[in-house]
Image (tube, rainbow, N blue to C red):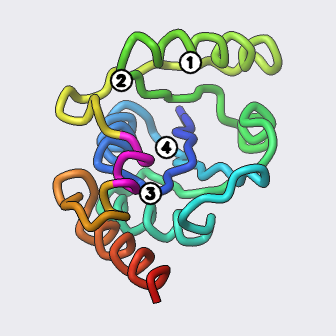
Amino acid sequence: MRRVVCPGSFDPVTNGHIDIIGRAARQYDEVVAAVLTNVNKRGLFSVEEKVDMLRECTADVGNITISQFSGLLVDFCRENDIGAIIRSLRSVSDFDYELQIAQMNYRLAGVETLFMTANPQYSFLSSSLVREIAQYGGDVSSLVTPYVEQRLRDKYESRES
């Protein structure tokens, strides 16, 4: 069975994330979308909320598993018998950053990194940009699923209360 992991913070999951995960799912037997638990970073959504959103957004694709991890991604790969990581590239600057990480992951554990170029429709898209637009009441309906859009709206409304 050919398994890959698509790791990320997914805070929140965007249409760009879903596009990459879905495209990977057409190429591999199983795609594990893995939410990073980063104790040094406080996100807008909890890990449990991110996992829930990913499950909802990928429910129509049968070969996607949602998981979470902390620590080194290569340790997660070893523990789950995953030999490759899928990373999205939006720009040349993404490549410079991702290449260093890919080379280190290979050196540490022999885990391959496969780069998938972002759909041009989403090449500008980032979770931080979506959060900023949503925080100020902007329209993010073309950037995230309706479920995620509602979760963002609920999150920012509860912060105002």
Q: Secondary structure at mark 2?
A: loop
Can you identify the residue that label 1 sits on? Answer: 98
Can you identify the residue that label 2 sits on? Answer: 90
Q: Residues within 10 Å of mark 4 (few under 14, many from 20)?
A: some
Q: Nearer the viewer, residue 160 or 23?
A: 160
Q: Residues within 10 Å of mark 3 (few under 14, many from 20)?
A: many
Q: Nearer the viewer, mark 3 or mark 4?
A: 3
Can you identify the residue that label 4 sits on? Answer: 30
Q: Earlier in the sequence, mark 1 or mark 3?
A: 3
Magenta-colored span: 126-132
Q: Nearer the viewer, residue 100 or 56?
A: 100
Please say whether residue 7 is one of the residues in the magenta stretch.
no
Mark on residue 12?
A: 3
Q: Nearer the viewer, residue 136 or 140?
A: 136
- Please state if 20 lies on the left or on the right of 81 as rendered: left
Cα distance, mark 3 to mark 2? 17 Å
Q: Position of residue 129 (x, y in %)?
A: 37, 46
Asked whether the residues under the numbered discs 1 and 2 touch, taking CB atoms below 8 Å apart as contact, a structural biologist would say no
Cα distance, mark 2 to mark 4? 24 Å
